Amino acid sequence: MTLWADRVLPFLVEKACRSSAILAERERWIPRAHGEVVELGVGSGLNLGFYDRDRVARVVGIDPSTALLARARPRAKTAPVPVELVEAPAEALPFGDRSFDSAVVTYALCSVGDPARALAEVRRVLRPGGELIFVEHGLAPDPRVQRWQHRLTPLWRRIGGGCHLDRDHARILRDAGFELDELATGYTEGARLLSHTYEGIARPA
């Protein structure tokens, strides 16, 4: 399993997350971040090239995966903004209260073991008026698709680094005390089971 987690899974995650549809989502949302930014689940750093140097002072990217952070380091060096990479889980952010102006999470909340705790941490480290920019895949509105997502998730979690196909991210955010300022949802063409997306901006209520 170590070989899978350290070698195979990081390669597959990066390959999947570099699709043209997902890159278009990154290009659309990541430039919205501003000030001091914390990125949860920075992974191999695919967002780092999209931060706006005129809006962002610094990005701190966190991830629990040593292997993915190793892939992120070359991208951190060439990013348009200063980047610090930290190995840590989203459920226990090693930062003081009110440390950041923006938080970013893309295709990572689906894999967090305790999303409620992770979002509580985001609330803690955001400054007043701060915002969470999110792009995630999760539970579809179509009951037929939902049934397949529920059936496949136990296996998918085992091979996909804990990834859940059936999380309702809008509900999870609201239950965690966030207001959804912007929310867009929809299927990615050709990937209905895997890619019903939730994307937008949320703020602590």
Image (cartoon, rainbow, N blue to C red):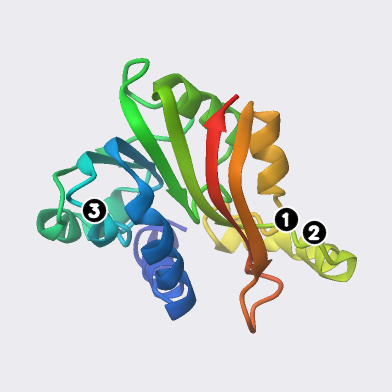
Q: Which residue is mark 2?
A: 150
- Badge 2 amino acid: His
Image position of 1 with respect to 55: above or below: below
Indicate the quadrant containing the C terminus: top left, top right, bottom left or bottom right: top right
Q: Residue furthest top?
A: 97
For the residues labelled 3 and 2, the Cα–Cα distance comes to 38 Å
Identify which residue is drawn at 32% across, 28% down.
100
For the residues labelled 1 and 3, the Cα–Cα distance comes to 32 Å
Q: Which residue is mark 3?
A: 52
Image position of 99 with respect to 139: above or below: above
Q: Earlier in the sequence, mark 1 or mark 2?
A: 2
Image coordinates for residue 146, horizontal then vertical, percent:
82, 63
Q: Which mark is residue 191?
A: none
- Badge 3 amino acid: Asp
> SS for tag 3?
loop
Residue 79, quarter of the rendered image:
bottom left
Disc nearest the viewer among 1 and 3:
3
Image position of 52 with respect to 95: above or below: below
Question: In the picture provided, is 4 more to the left or to the right than 176?
Answer: left
Q: Residue furthest left?
A: 77
Q: Are marks 1 and 2 in contact (CB under 8 Å)?
A: yes
Disc nearest the viewer among 3 and 2:
3
Front one among 168 and 128:
128
Q: Earlier in the sequence, mark 3 or mark 2?
A: 3
Other residues around mark 3 within 10 Å, as few (<14) / some (14–19) / many (≥20): some
Identify which residue is drawn at 64% across, 37% down.
173
Q: Which residue is mark 1?
A: 166
Other residues around mark 2 within 10 Å, as few (<14) / some (14–19) / many (≥20): some
